[in-house]
Image (cartoon, rainbow, N blue to C red):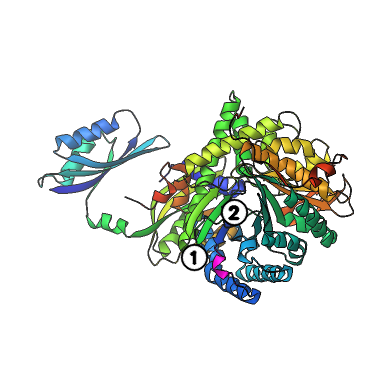
């Protein structure tokens, strides 16, 4: 059995998921995971597809591209590597970094570079500008042995120098205040 | 992981709306420190507190950093001192109080509660000795807090204890006349005293509690006020039920925060997690006031018409949200109206809207009671006992906790200002009706427990 990770980007319209999933189905693939989002009118989807050993990445790419109008879908296909999920499970804890500042060039680059230097992976990143203010929410996985105090200090120093309001907090505070599950059970993660 | 909007609103709640954990209080059992020699008692108490509570402050700091939530006060509550030091004289009790004061300072906690006695049905000689030691204990130490349970729904009201306490309050106030009688701010007199209360001055480690237990007091007047304001500014048609619902939801989130912090601190200390006390505890800071919540609900001046009903709705909504959020809710859990500690309430007193009588009515529907009330310095012990008895009667009859923290301010009259400083705030001195209850109080004995049936 072959497994692939497929991404599709396009100008949003009704029917893209139907077209993409139809093409994958006709190629003999089965979608096992899917995440879709729309950003400023542009559609993007990432899927995990499994299929027979005869299913190739080129075939998937060609079939999905042909499911849209000429040049409508930008498609990428990578073979799935099973160690990816193992890596994710190595996270000791997850933290949320929220930042707000006046929008300007280079903030996202600076913060992501800082995290990369500490070997911290950004699992999820959401940023938007409202009335000239840049708001960022980053979910990061902190592995065992990461120097959280050093990271926190570095973020705070950068925030103070740049007039940014920043906070790094363990994810459980957000889960506790929004999920119905008892606080006692928050540790029982999947 | 919650949605982005939820994350951002939680961050806003933490950073801009004064959400903090007001008190993490570690209850420590001290009954195993009792001894005939007071030196031994003090040594055992010091050793036990150092052993059990030294990690309290570092643990709170660690958890606070992890979740980005300030823990404002770290405190210790001990088993009632009247029992721990039973049989010792006033000098012995003062020695114990000094030991507690010094140990609390060394550990880095701001208060240690539990210099307490349970006298609702009668005073033992040890209880009486403890009460008689209070004027010196409360004026000679800075961190020791005292409390006395002088009434309960099952025992009635111990008027002998209240008169003695009235006399001791006057002496304690006189001993700290240069600080407007501040010693009395560290004494709380209860009806139906909770044994798991994390808030000072009334925190004590009750007899039915574990060896070491972490109880948490959440704050949140600022958060609740902003939630109500936001709802009103949204421009949609609202009814009181919408306001109550919003308060309930906010209380849920506040309570969850408290439980998360409390459980983690307890785990680090190898102590049992006890309860979250839902009480909205104000500070003198602007934006952190129960009075301002009532303003936001639509009561223009606290003490004016509608104040009691609005406070009842607030307290009930807080309890409903909190009890849904956690199965470990306890302590006093309501809304505090400590006059000196709440700038809006203090102002309402100064403006003449909030009187002792109206406060008494308001405390019938909330916790805790007549709290941080500055009174004229020439008030008599009998009058103090009578005012206290009035408030405790509300608790006894309604099967709820009520507490009294009255501060007779030496040399000052109604309308002048008493200044206590810090979290204790300041307040205009309230007027006391010049009517004598001396003959009633001096009858002494006990007001019998109220009937538990025919409850209409």
Residue that carries the numbered disc 2 in the rendered image? B198
Q: Is residue A25 left or right of residue B186?
A: left
Sort mark 1 into few (<14), some (14-19) or many (20+) by Cα contacts within 10 Å. few
Q: Quadrant of residue B299?
A: top right
Residues rendered magenta in the picture: B29-35
Q: Is residue B348 left or right of residue A169?
A: right
Q: Compare residues B107 and B144 and report the one nearer the observer.
A: B144
Q: Is residue B118 left or right of residue A98?
A: right
Q: Compare residues A35 and B233 and report the one nearer the observer.
A: B233
Q: Which secondary structure lies at badge 2?
A: loop
Chain where mark 1 sits: A
Residue B21 % position (x, y): 58, 52
Q: Is residue A155 left or right of residue B175?
A: left
Residue B31 is inside the magenta segment: yes
Q: Nearer the viewer, mark 1 or mark 2?
A: 2
Residue A64 % position (x, y): 22, 37
Residue B428 seen: no
Residue B224 % position (x, y): 60, 40
Q: Compare residues B394 and B50 and report the one nearer the observer.
A: B394
Instruction: Please report the residue visible at 16 percent of the width from the left and 40 percent of the height from the top.
Output: A29
In space, the residues marked 1 and 2 are separated at their CA atoms by: 30 Å
Q: Quadrant of residue A40?
A: top left
The extreme top residue here reads B237
Chain where mark 2 sits: B
Asked if the residue at tag 2 contacts the one at tag 1, i.e. Cβ–Cβ closer than 8 Å, the answer is no
Q: Compare residues B179 and B77 and report the one nearer the observer.
A: B77
Residue B330 seen: yes
Instruction: Please report the residue visible at 18 percent of the width from the left and 48 percent of the height from the top.
Output: A3
Residue B109 % position (x, y): 62, 64
Instruction: Please report the residue visible at 74 percent of the width from the left and 50 percent of the height from the top.
Output: B160
Residue that carries the numbered disc 1 in the rendered image? A149
């Amino acid at each position: 059995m072959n497994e692939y990770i497929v991404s599709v980007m396009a100008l949003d319209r009704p029917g893209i998921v139907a077209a993409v999933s139809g093409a994958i189905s006709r190629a003999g693939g089965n979608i096992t995971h899917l995440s879709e989002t729309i950003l400023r009118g542009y559609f993007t989807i990432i899927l995990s597809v499994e299929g027979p050993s005869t299913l190739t990445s080129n075939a998937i790419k060609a079939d999905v591209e042909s499911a849209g109008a000429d040049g409508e879908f930008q498609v990428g296909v990578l073979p799935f590597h099973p160690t990816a999920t193992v890596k994710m499970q190595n996270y000791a804890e997850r933290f949320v970094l929220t930042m707000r500042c006046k929008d300007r060039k280079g903030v996202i680059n600076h913060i992501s570079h800082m995290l990369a230097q500490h070997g911290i992976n950004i699992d999820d990143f959401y940023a938007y500008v409202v009335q000239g203010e840049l708001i960022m929410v980053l979910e990061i996985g902190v592995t065992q042995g990461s120097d959280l105090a050093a990271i926190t200090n570095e973020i705070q120093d950068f925030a103070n120098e740049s007039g940014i309001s920043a906070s790094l907090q363990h994810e459980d505070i957000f889960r506790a205040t929004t999920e119905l599950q008892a606080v006692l059970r928050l540790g029982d993660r999947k | 992981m919650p949605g982005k909007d939820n994350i951002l609103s939680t961050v806003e709640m933490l950073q801009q709306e004064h959400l903090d954990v007001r008190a993490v209080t570690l209850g420590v059992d001290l009954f195993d420190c009792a001894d005939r020699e007071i030196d031994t008692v003090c040594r055992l108490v010091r050793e036990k507190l150092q052993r059990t509570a030294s990690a309290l402050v570092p643990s709170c700091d660690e958890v606070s950093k992890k979740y980005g939530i300030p823990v404002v006060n770290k405190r210790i509550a001990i088993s009632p001192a009247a029992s721990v030091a039973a049989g010792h004289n006033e000098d012995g009790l003062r020695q114990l109080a000094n030991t507690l004061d010094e140990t609390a300072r060394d550990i880095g906690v701001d208060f240690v509660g539990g210099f307490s006695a349970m006298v609702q049905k009668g005073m033992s000689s040890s209880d009486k000795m403890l009460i008689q030691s209070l004027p010196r204990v409360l004026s000679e130490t800075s961190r020791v807090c005292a409390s006395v349970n002088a009434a309960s729904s099952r025992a009635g009201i111990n008027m002998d204890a209240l008169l003695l306490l009235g006399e001791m309050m006057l002496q304690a106030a006189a001993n700290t006349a240069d600080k407007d009688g501040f010693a009395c701010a560290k004494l709380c007199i209860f009806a139906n005293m909770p044994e798991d209360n994390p808030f000072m001055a009334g925190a004590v480690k009750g007899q039915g509690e574990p060896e070491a237990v972490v109880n948490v007091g959440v704050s949140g007047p600022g958060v609740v006020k902003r939630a109500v304001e936001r709802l009103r500014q949204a421009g949609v048609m609202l009814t009181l039920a919408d306001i109550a619902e919003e308060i309930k939801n906010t209380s849920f989130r506040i309570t969850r925060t408290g439980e998360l912090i409390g459980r983690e601190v307890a785990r680090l200390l190898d102590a049992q997690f006890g309860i979250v006390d839902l009480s909205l505890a104000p500070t003198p800071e602007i934006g952190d006031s129960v009075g301002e919540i009532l303003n936001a609900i639509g009561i223009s001046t606290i003490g004016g018409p509608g104040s009691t009903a609005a406070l009842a709705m607030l307290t009930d909504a807080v309890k409903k949200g909190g009890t849904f959020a956690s199965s470990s809710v306890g302590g006093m859990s309501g809304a505090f109206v400590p006059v000196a500690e709440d700038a809006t309430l203090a102002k309402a007193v100064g403006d003449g809207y909030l009187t002792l009588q109206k406060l008494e009515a308001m405390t019938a529907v909330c916790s805790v009671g007549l709290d941080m009330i500055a009174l004229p310095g020439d008030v008599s012990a009998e009058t103090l006992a009578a005012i206290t008895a009035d408030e405790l009667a509300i608790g006894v009859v309604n099967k709820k906790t009520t507490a009294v923290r009255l501060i007779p301010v030496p040399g000052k009259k109604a309308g002048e200002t008493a200044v206590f400083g810090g979290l204790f705030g300041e307040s205009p001195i309230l007027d006391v009706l010049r009517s004598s209850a001396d003959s009633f109080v001096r009858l002494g004995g006990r007001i019998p427990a109220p009937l538990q049936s025919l409850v209409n």
